[in-house]
Amino acid sequence: MATGELLTPYDADAPGRRASLLGLATRGTAFLPVLALVLLLPRQSGDWTNDAIFAAIYAMVGLSMNVLVGYTGQISLGQQAFLGIGALTAANVVHTGTNAPDPFTFALGMVCAVAVSAGAAAVLGGIALRIRGLYLALVTLVFGAVTADAVFTIPSLNGNDAGVSAYRPTAIQTDYSYYIFAVAMVGVCLYVDVWIRRTKVGRGLIALRDNELVASSFGINVLGYKLLGFVLSGAMAGLAGGVFAFWSQEFSDKDFTATAGFNKALIFVVMVVVGGLGNRAGVVAAAAFFALLDPILSGIAHSTGWINYYTDHKAYISNIIGAVLLLQTLIFNPGGLGQVLRPFTRWFGGHPFSLHDEHGDAAAAALAGGSDVRA
Amino acid sequence: MHVLASAFSTETNFVTPLISGIANGSAYGLLGLGLVLLYKSNRIFNFAQGEFATIAAIVAYVFDRGTGWVPKAPYFLALALGVLASVLTAMLTERMVIRPLFNRPRVVLVVATIGVALLLIGVEGMLPYPQTASLRTISDVLNVRSYVTQVDHVAILDQDLAKFIALALLAVAAFVFFRFTPTGTAILAVSQDATAARVVGISVERISATTWAIAGLLGGIAGVLLAVPPSGSVTPGSITGLTLTVAFSAAVLGGMTSLPGAFVGGLLIGLIEAFANADQSFIPGLSSLPTAQAEVAVAIVLLVILLVRPRGLLGQEA
């Protein structure tokens, strides 16, 4: 899917243009409210901190989907399985009974979560990406159901159905300090995303996505690059899974059932498209929105007296909201939320402020005209 | 069949999964027909196909019971109204979602069908009815015994036979439609090159609407046949969550471009599932997880067919 940021001419990325000292100071001051929103608002109450950690986990999943859908043009309907594999691995590696793990064990658990998820992605992608077309969507769909029913339910891996405890190390024991850790992990994912975009890897992936035949005739290894994109995406989701395990302080297969997982998979696709494919800021914002949708809506329902109706129908209500946002984004606003945020993100990036984003318009035009990728 | 039969201790152990496998396989095949039709014509995987089926089941259920302000309709009229509802849903999907996106990359269309599925699940869940649609069986309506015949003391239920017959007839009809009728060949022409088809005078818009209407028809027929207990009942999203995944595997096994392939693939996958469920040691090492046997077996079949023969058993191209 060709979109927003990725159609920026390469010279627009080039360094050379630096904002003045005054400009930097202005941007820094303007950034303070954003920083305060991210760092201080979750501090207001315990529930808010918990919701904010959940939003950070979703942001990581969103960025992992961004690598896959935004840069390689493939869809995965099994991202929740990598999340689960990450959580399962982290909890089982760190497993220290009722004691808090030492930082080294904790770090090892996180690294293993990333490695095992990446390995699973490599095996799966190695098979599914050989075939032209969107078969990855089908294979990951089946993979998601199978891992939920046949891997997460293995008694020796899920603590005989009682859950594997995953206590946090003492340094990040409190919810708020763990939230800061989660935000730092989102930062890691953002860095990987930037790295992908700035290196040969990202250029290769995007070239492949836009036209496989042309890209391969320029010497890009089709299977290798697609596989790399899928593995990076799986690894990020695995990291999110590790953060998830220590957030809920256990791995339980009940959090990753096949039916719940399937619904999550669809929401993950929705949030990356609504956020704007290939657009980091938009994807993070959309992911946080969908993570916070339930707390926000139930808050509104509480204060308006609709709480019983809401509790009975909440899955359906969020389905409708997600679907309407997705379809309107696809049909009317292909750049997604990222396109709306773009004047601001560009300005923060050191460019002059301008509501008219010529590159964004080019992106929309390219999407509407259609590079007709035959699957 | 002898080899398979000898692996089971008694005759009954072989007949039970055989019959349930064909019954479930028919359901996968029925859903698979719609998936293949849209893959053949639009080169997309339609994730909304399961909800087209659900809509039909729910509408048929509501008219059969006559709940709320809805008048009670005769059984077969209720079924027809259900199928009509899913045809209209499919046509609406085509007009509102697919047509504006027709020239976009295929991945956009696939994501759009996911959006349609989510939307339909949400809307179905908000409708005022008891959330579970289970239709009466034909034998209930006609007041006759509930099975057609017995094979080795295993009853063949009328709704299972109905599914199988419907699948066989529709597979043949769809095959004939694409091979011999002007509309069918026009659909194929548009799928191969929309611009060239327009040049020779085919209305791409009308063909697209027709294709989706047929997909809705196939989905609707699948829906009213799937929502019959004891083997089935329908809740919002249940067909998408449980049956659609397997139906996709069946369609890939038979060949995404082959309508008879959906028939063959559906039955094969149904049988593989049934025998995996019947035999605890079907997949070594998984005997502690009896429910996962069938799923793992289907996943292995899908991966193997994609590796060895991506175009499927009866498909023409990858």
Image (cartoon, coloured by chain):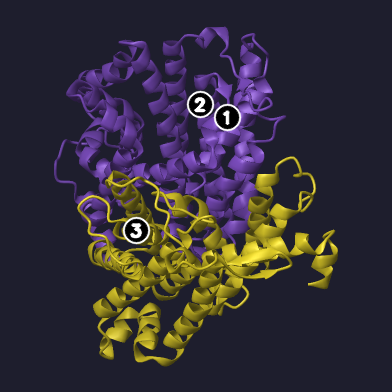
Chain colours: A purple, B yellow
State which mark lies toward you, 1 or 3.
Answer: 3
Q: Badge 2 sits on which subunit?
A: A
Amino acid on which the number 1 mark rests in the picture: Ala
Q: Which mark is residue A87?
A: 1
Where is residue B63? Give x, y as percent: 29, 60
Q: Secondary structure at mark 3?
A: helix
Where is residue A182? Give x, y as percent: 45, 22
Amino acid on which the number 2 mark rests in the picture: Phe
One can see residue A358 in this view: yes
Front residue of A311/A60: it is A311
Q: Secondary structure at mark 2?
A: helix
Q: Badge 3 sits on which subunit?
A: B
Distance of mark 1 from mark 3, alpha carbons?
36 Å
Front residue of B15/B113: it is B15
- Horizontally, residue A344 falls left or right of residue B52, namely left
State which mark lies toward you, 2 or 3.
Answer: 3
Distance of mark 1 from mark 2, alpha carbons?
6 Å
Distance of mark 2 from mark 3, alpha carbons?
36 Å
- Same chain, labels 1 and 2: yes
- Same chain, labels 1 and 3: no
Mark 3, residues whose alpha carbon is within 10 Å: few (<14), some, or many (≥20)?
many
Residue placed at 56% from the left, 7% from the top?
Answer: A170
- Horizontally, residue B12 falls left or right of residue B26, namely right
Q: Which mark is residue A339?
A: none
Indicate the quadrant containing the C terminus of chain A: top left, top right, bottom left or bottom right.
bottom left
- Residue under circle 3? B55
Residue placed at 35% from the left, 56% from the top?
Answer: B58
Mark 1, residues whose alpha carbon is within 10 Å: few (<14), some, or many (≥20)?
many
Q: Is residue A330 above or below residue A243?
A: below
Indicate the quadrant containing the N terminus of chain A: top left, top right, bottom left or bottom right.
bottom left
Amino acid on which the number 3 mark rests in the picture: Ile
- Residue under circle 2? A244
